[in-house]
Image (cartoon, rainbow, N blue to C red):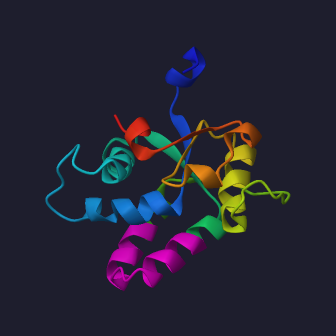
Amino acid sequence: MPQNVRKRKLRTVIDTSVLVAGISGFREPFVPGRNPKADVLHEWVEQNGFIWLVTEDILDEYKEVLKRVGVRPSLIGKVINLIRERPEVVKVRSSAEISPDPKDDAFCLCAEQGKADFIVTLNLKDFPQNRLKAYVVQPNHFAK
């Protein structure tokens, strides 16, 4: 990792797949290391360990997918409100087809225009590293 990246908070886009898989991290008791997806979320919540980059489209997708997979509405509200407390909201000024999955273009554009250091995802194939400046990693490579 470049030296200048280590000296500041990492700018990070979290794919919905990681949020959904890590939602168990918001249940008690949390055990570090048991679920790398939950570790990523806890690092952000408890230690303010990185700058979470979002767009309104990404927040909408988080809500829609969490609802679709059956997460309780009260927990969805808690999670979304927590994310809204201190993200950096990126205003995407253009559109582009970057990902093989058109729904992931919002995450790619957020990363590019928000100058992200990382995109954390479970679906590496949907985030073509050769078309992105941010490092595309799985949660176990991102969480400490």
Residue 12 placement (x, y as % from top left): 55, 44
Q: Which residues are magenta?
A: 60-80
| Residue ID at (16%, 62%) | 28
73 sits to left or right of 102: left
Question: Does residue 24 lie above or below 47 as drawn?
Answer: below
Query: Residue drawn 65% across and 50% down?
Result: 127
User: Is 54 left, or right, of 42 in this rendering?
Assistant: right
Whole-percent x and y of residue 136?
A: 58, 41
Q: Residue at x 56, y 24 (%)?
A: 5
Residue 40 versus residue 68 in the image, above or below: above
Residue 82 visible here? no
Q: Position of residue 67 (x, y in %)?
A: 44, 82
Q: Check if residue 36 falls in the magenta segment.
A: no
Q: Quadrant of residue 69?
A: bottom left
Residue 47 placement: quadrant? top left
Q: How many marks?
A: 0
Secondary structure, magenta segment, majority class: helix
